[in-house]
Image (tube, rainbow, N blue to C red):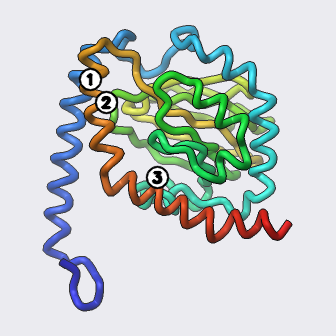
Amino acid sequence: MSSATGKIPKKSKPLRKRIRRSAKKLLADIGAFQVRHALIPDQPVFDNDRFHWAVNLEAHYATIRKELDRVLEYRERLPRLYDIQRDQYRISADDKWKAFVICGWGINTREGARLCPETARIVNDIPGLQSAFFSILEPGAHIPEHRGHVRGLLRGQLALKVPANREDCTIWVEGTPFHWDEGHLFVFDDTYLHEVRNATKEERVVLILHFDRPMDRVGRISHQALLFLIRRSGFVRKGHRNIAKWEKRVLRRSVTSN
């Protein structure tokens, strides 16, 4: 219960930490089970030929890039990642990581469908898609080393804008450096440690996709049960509310005024 000042009592903080530790332990146990039922190896990075839809996605690069350019007309008004998900503050606290969400945990956003209808159509054809958003890293942005917690999902990044000096714009996955190529998809397991640094004077934009790891029937059942709980968690509900508030307060007003 909140105090009269509206602040969370200090005694609740250790409890919240214990709950988070327990949740992470549970996710790790479920993830280990799902990997045992996966139809692909347990490794940090994957070749695109494992995903039949990758060729079609890359073929639509020009269409997606055109709709991205429309979104970037409002780049100064786009939300920082932690404006959408407060729990991401630790890895996006330098204010140089912005996002435009098209689909979040299976729900299409209103402005994503309106500003990027073709992109929304294209990504919704990806089997097991859970989320899709434009990830915009400003010059000098640094995302410190971190890892995801849902092993039933993989992450794809379609490179849309890559700085000319691409060697200084890097993602490390388990310590191995990779560089983006415009129009090409990069797929990895984000539960492995990864870090990003844009040490250039240009912005970097990728379309981030979270999609289901290919698994057998038992693995898929456990994954769908976990997704059912995640979608109803405060983490996801707050994220959807924050997106809706931002759309109403900022983007829709600015589009209407133009």
Secondary structure state at the residue bearing disc 2: helix
Which quadrant, please, contains the N terminus? bottom left
On residue 163, the disc is none
* Crowd band around label 3 with a 10 angstrom C-alpha radius: few (<14), some (14–19), many (20+): some
Residue that mark 1 sits on: 221
Residue 78 placement, left or right of 174: right
The type of residue carrying mark 1 is Ile
* Crowd band around label 1 with a 10 angstrom C-alpha radius: few (<14), some (14–19), many (20+): few
Which quadrant, please, contains the C terminus? bottom right
Residue that mark 3 sits on: 91
Q: Position of residue 212 (x, y in %)?
A: 42, 25
Pair 1/3: label in front: 1
Please tell me which residue is depicted at 72% across the width and 43% down the height of the picture. Answer: 116
The type of residue carrying mark 2 is Gln
User: In the rendered image, which quarter is residue 9 located in?
Assistant: bottom left
Secondary structure state at the residue bearing disc 3: helix
Q: Position of residue 223 (x, y in %)?
A: 30, 28
Please tell me which residue is depicted at 66% across the width and 45% down the height of the picture. Answer: 113
